[in-house]
Image (cartoon, rainbow, N blue to C red):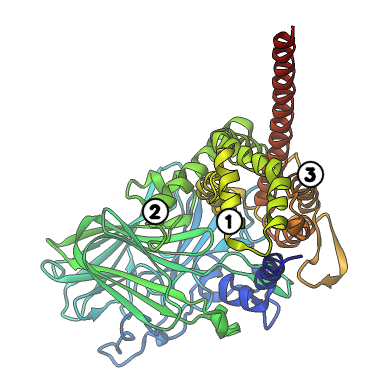
């Protein structure tokens, strides 16, 4: 085993260690131990500020604004926390929203189609995913006019507070009114639609004309991916996104700090792994966007994780006495995001500007892959089968590049004995060795810089985009497949059965697909790696892939396993075709020599 092989082996071990280490889990992926077991919310455990029965009064703690200063005392000397008020509950086909009369702010947004307990069917009320953080001290869709914060105002609902459902109507409007500091009347109206995760917020008052109005979501967004009773929970770092009508800026602030942007902006949003809350204005206009990162309960569990939540706000000068906004609070499903018509789908994927301006083209590749995946699911009605079909399509598209790469590797394998002979002959003279190798490459039409790497490099953006898509697609959350019956959630790691103990680097879950992928990788490497210096890699690579993919989402492992198997089949077919061609050529050459002798 030469020095390069030893170095490669060490790097592989370091890579596996990094992916499984506490540093990676906490700093990169946000996986960390939970100090105390967090149980699923139910009707008896939920915070009274959001889960009280419709119509009951909701109590919230004193406000501490994460963007602006806390609301000042009222003119009568009372504090916001001392005021009794009601919560209005609105239920649509998609969500259940609670609006606090104090400030007329949103204190609860529950997803009716998404549950903490993954599974088919609508979520039960007690397990429906909540987007407003449990520890939030201020509600969302809060409004301030110039220097006056309105969160401390006690609004009056136009109708009696309590529960409201759309019934047979397609839309429902809930209006709140209050008096501002200078005595002007202000109305804040919320408009909901039946089959939508978007609701409108309209502010009307003679006091706002010509003045700066700010709408904010100071509470950030709750991370949905936690499990009841688990000793560890995996979160994704939450991010903020700012859209100026052309490009989107992705922000992930890893400390308690504030970012401000002045210019023409259309919306600002904050995302968890699968959900988005966005404040949408009427078109891109000059204004100011503020994003502030703050520590919430997830960060307090382990401050090293740096999983800070993000408060967002959008402000601009009002042209008249009324201003309209929309709030999207729901899943990051590409069809839903595109339906809003303001490019919300740009929050799904980012890129790296330093790498060939990947922030420009990589999100497009990811979106194409996701659109094709969803379209295939519409036809076959099974995301596992859709992943199989998508893998076949990708293999067909990249076939010319794969063929070029494999041909280069086959030619290199055929030349390997001659290459080894040259190295052995000139092992004491590096200059003559290089000259002889270059002459050998030229005689056989080979590029000395190994052109087989270029086709593989060109395939990497497509392959990596599938990795990102299958890891982030909410469409796979809680969804199983008939292809692997024991997998009930393609967004989670496969568990064939669990061991009674933890295996270092590997974990305690035994998954079948990574084992199959490891076997395929071994067979493939055994057939292609003939260089004695690479012998160790034949055994190291399959083990590394097995360990690494054991904790990856099942949908991603399904894709990679099938892709590896198709690659092996393709390689065998090419070798057979090459053997048949070589035999035919030898036969023709023999016939030609026979004719010459005759």
Picture quarter containing residue 550? bottom right
Q: Nearer the viewer, residue 131 or 472?
A: 472
Q: From the image, tell me which residue sits under label 1.
A: 434
Residue at the far front in the pictured view: 597
Crowdedness of circle 2 by 10 Å Cα count: few (<14), some, many (20+)?
Answer: many
Earlier sequence position, callout 2 versus callout 1? 2
Which residue sits at x=65%, y=51%? 556
Which residue sits at x=48%, y=74%? 57
Which one is closest to the eye, mark 3 or mark 1?
1
Give the side of residue 361 with respect to residue 295, left or right. Answer: left
Crowdedness of circle 1 by 10 Å Cα count: few (<14), some, many (20+)?
Answer: some
Picture quarter containing residue 208? bottom left
Which residue sits at x=68%, y=75%? 21
Q: Nearer the viewer, residue 362 or 480?
A: 362
Residue 499 lies, with reference to residue 450, above or below; the image says below
SS at mark 1? helix
Q: In the image, residue 541 lies at what x, y percent?
A: 73, 58
Q: From the image, tell me which residue sits under label 3.
A: 485
Earlier sequence position, callout 3 versus callout 1? 1
Residue 483 lies, with reference to residue 592, above or below; the image says below
Residue 254 lies, with reference to residue 390, above or below; the image says below
Q: In the image, residue 476 lies at what x, y percent?
A: 61, 49
Q: From the image, tell me which residue sits under label 2.
A: 346
Q: In the image, residue 278 lies at what x, y percent?
A: 38, 60
Image quarter hosting the N terminus = bottom right
Q: CA distance from mark 3 to mark 1?
A: 55 Å
SS at mark 2? helix
């Amino acid at each position: 085993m030469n020095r390069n092989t030893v170095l490669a082996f060490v790097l592989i071990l370091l890579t596996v260690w990094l992916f499984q280490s506490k540093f990676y889990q906490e700093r990169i992926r946000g996986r960390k131990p939970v100090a105390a077991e967090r149980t699923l919310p139910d009707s008896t455990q939920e915070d009274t500020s959001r889960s009280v029965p419709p119509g009951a009064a909701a109590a919230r703690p004193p406000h501490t604004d994460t963007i602006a200063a806390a609301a000042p005392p009222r003119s009568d000397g009372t504090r916001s926390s001392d005021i009794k008020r009601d919560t209005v509950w609105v239920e649509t086909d998609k969500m259940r929203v609670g609006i606090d009369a104090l400030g007329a702010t949103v204190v609860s947004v529950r997803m009716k189609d998404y549950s903490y307990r993954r599974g088919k069917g609508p979520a039960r009320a007690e397990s429906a995913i909540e987007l407003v953080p449990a520890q939030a001290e201020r509600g969302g869709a809060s409004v301030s006019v110039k220097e006056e914060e309105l969160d401390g105002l006690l609004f009056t609902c136009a109708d009696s507070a309590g529960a409201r459902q759309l019934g047979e109507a397609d839309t429902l409007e809930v209006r709140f009114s209050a008096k501002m500091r200078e005595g002007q009347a202000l109305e804040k109206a919320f408009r909901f639609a039946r089959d939508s995760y978007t609701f409108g917020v309209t502010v009307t008052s003679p006091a706002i004309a010509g003045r700066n109005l700010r709408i904010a979501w100071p509470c950030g967004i709750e991370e949905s991916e936690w499990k009841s009773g688990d000793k560890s929970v995996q979160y994704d770092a939450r991010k903020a996104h700012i859209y100026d009508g052309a490009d989107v800026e992705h922000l992930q602030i890893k400390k308690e700090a504030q970012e401000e942007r002045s210019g023409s902006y259309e919306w600002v949003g904050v995302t968890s792994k699968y959900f988005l809350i966005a404040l949408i204005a009427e078109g891109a206009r000059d204004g100011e966007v503020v994003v502030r990162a703050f520590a919430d309960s997830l960060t307090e569990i382990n401050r090293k994780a740096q999983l800070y939540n993000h408060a967002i706000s959008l402000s601009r000068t009002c042209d008249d006495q009324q201003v309209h906004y929309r709030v999207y609070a729901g899943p990051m499903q590409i069809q839903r995001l595109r339906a809003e018509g303001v490019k919300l789908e740009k929050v799904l994927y980012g890129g790296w500007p330093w790498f060939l301006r990947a922030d420009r083209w990589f999100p497009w590749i990811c979106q194409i892959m996701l659109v094709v995946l969803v379209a295939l699911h519409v036809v076959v009605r099974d995301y596992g089968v859709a992943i199989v079909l998508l893998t076949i399509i990708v293999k067909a598209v990249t076939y010319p590049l794969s063929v070029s790469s494999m041909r280069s590797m086959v030619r290199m394998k055929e030349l390997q004995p001659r290459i080894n002979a040259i190295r052995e002959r000139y092992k004491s003279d590096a200059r003559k060795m290089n000259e002889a190798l270059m002459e050998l490459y030229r005689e056989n039409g080979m590029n000395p810089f190994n052109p087989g790497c270029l086709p593989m490099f060109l395939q990497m953006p497509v392959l990596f985009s599938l990795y990102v898509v299958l890891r982030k697609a909410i469409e796979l959350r809680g969804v199983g497949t008939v292809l692997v019956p024991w997998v009930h959630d393609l967004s989670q790691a496969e568990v064939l059965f669990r061991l009674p103990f933890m295996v270092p680097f590997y974990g305690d879950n035994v998954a079948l697909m990574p084992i199959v992928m490891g076997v395929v990788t071994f067979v493939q490497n055994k057939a292609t790696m003939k260089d004695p210096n690479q012998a160790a890699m034949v055994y190291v690579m399959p083990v590394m892939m097995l360990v690494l993919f054991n904790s990856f989402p099942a949908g991603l492992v399904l894709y990679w396993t099938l892709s590896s198997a198709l690659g092996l089949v393709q390689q065998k077919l090419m070798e057979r075709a090459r053997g048949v061609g070589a035999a035919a050529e030898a036969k023709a050459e023999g016939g030609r020599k026979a004719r010459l002798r005759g």
